[in-house]
Amino acid sequence: MKIAFSPCPNDTFVFHAWVHGLVPGAPKLDVTYADIDITNGLAASGSGPEILKISYAALPWVLKNYALIPCGGALGRGCGPLVLAKESGDASALSGRRVAVPSERSTAYLLFRLWAAQNVPGGVDEIVVMPFHEIMPAVRDGSIDAGLVIHEARFTYPNYGLSLLTDLGSWWESDTGLPIPLGAIIARRDLDLNRIADWTRASVEYAWANPSASASYVLEHAQELEPKVAQAHIDLYVNSFTRDLGDDGYAAVTSLLTRAADEGLVPQVDAAALRPMPARN
C-alpha cells in the first residue's frame, strides 16, 4: 500500500510502527516522504497514493476521491502558525506589505487570510509563495516584509532575530473556541476506511507506548533538527486529536472550511462528506 507523508517528526513518530511492520495485520507500506504542498498536489491529481497526509485546507479539492480518516493527523491547541517580521509591531505593520507563505493550500494560509481580513487595514500588498525553509532567512535579510511559518519555526524563529507579529493559533482559538486543524490523513474512498483508521490508530498507540522506539527513524528524517526540538515538535502536534478527531475536531474542520468558503478561498464543502465512516461500537 502506498502512502505519502512529510518527514516532520510528528508524521514519522505516528507512522513509525506501521512503516516498520509493527502493526498486526496491516499491509506493508511503500512510503514517499514529501512536503505537504507536494502531497496536496498528489491528492488533487486524483491518482496519488492510497493514503496521504495533506493540509485540511486542501480537503475541498480532494473529497471526491479521498475520505478523511479520523486519526493520525495534526490538530490541537497552542500549535498554530505564526506571522513573523524583522521588527516588532502589530497587524497594521502588514498593510501594503509583501508576505511570504509556504503554500496557498494550507491551513496556515487560510488562517492568515481570515485573520488579515479582520485585522490588517487595506490588506497586504502581495502574497509570495516560497519554500518553507527559505521564509525566515528572507524575512531576516529584508527581501520579504513578513513571513507565515509553521512547525518547528515556533521554536527556532528567535535564532533568526525575528519578532512575532501574531500567533494565528491563539487568534483562532479565542475567536472560535475550537482547536486548530492543520494536517489531515486521507485515504481513497474505494478502500476499507475503518481498517485504515484502525491500523493508523494502532500505530499512534504503539508510538505512545514505546516512545523511544521511533527515535532514530524520526531524527533520520527530521531535516537536521536537534533531538530536543524534534521532541518538542512531537509533543505539540501528537495529542488526543491524533488518536481521534471527536466532535470538537470535526467542528473545527467544518468551521475552518465554512469560513474559508464564505471568503471565497476554497470551494463549498458538504459537512456530511467530512464524516463518511460509520460509527464504530
Image (spheres, rainbow, N blue to C red):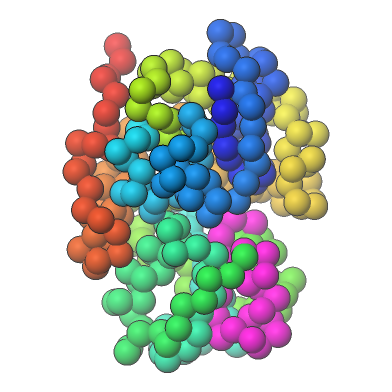
> Vertical placement of 121 versus 168: above or below?
below
| Residue 150 magenta-highlighted | yes
Looking at the rendered image, the quarter that the N terminus falls into is top right
Q: Going 46% across and 78% down the picture, which residue do you hit?
A: 127
Residue 18: x, y in percent? 62, 21
Question: Quick one: which residue is furthest to the top in this view?
Answer: 25
Asked whether the viewer can see residue 280, the reply is yes
> Vertical placement of 207 versus 254: above or below?
above
Residue 234: x, y in percent? 62, 42
| Residue 119 magenta-highlighted | no
Q: Going 66% across and 79% down the picture, which residue do you hit?
A: 138
- Compared across the picture, whether 64 is left or right of 129 comes to left
> Vertical placement of 86 versus 132: above or below?
below
- Compared across the picture, whether 235 is left or right of 119 comes to right
- Provide the residue span drawn in magenta: 132-152
- Compared across the picture, whether 54 is left or right of 256 comes to right
Residue 87: x, y in percent? 60, 87
Q: Going 60% across and 51% down the picture, which residue do you hit?
A: 35
Q: What is the count of numbered marks?
A: 0
Q: Going 73% across and 47% down the picture, which residue do you hit?
A: 222
Asked whether the viewer can see residue 68, the reply is no
Looking at the rendered image, the quarter that the C terminus falls into is top left
Residue 133: x, y in percent? 67, 64
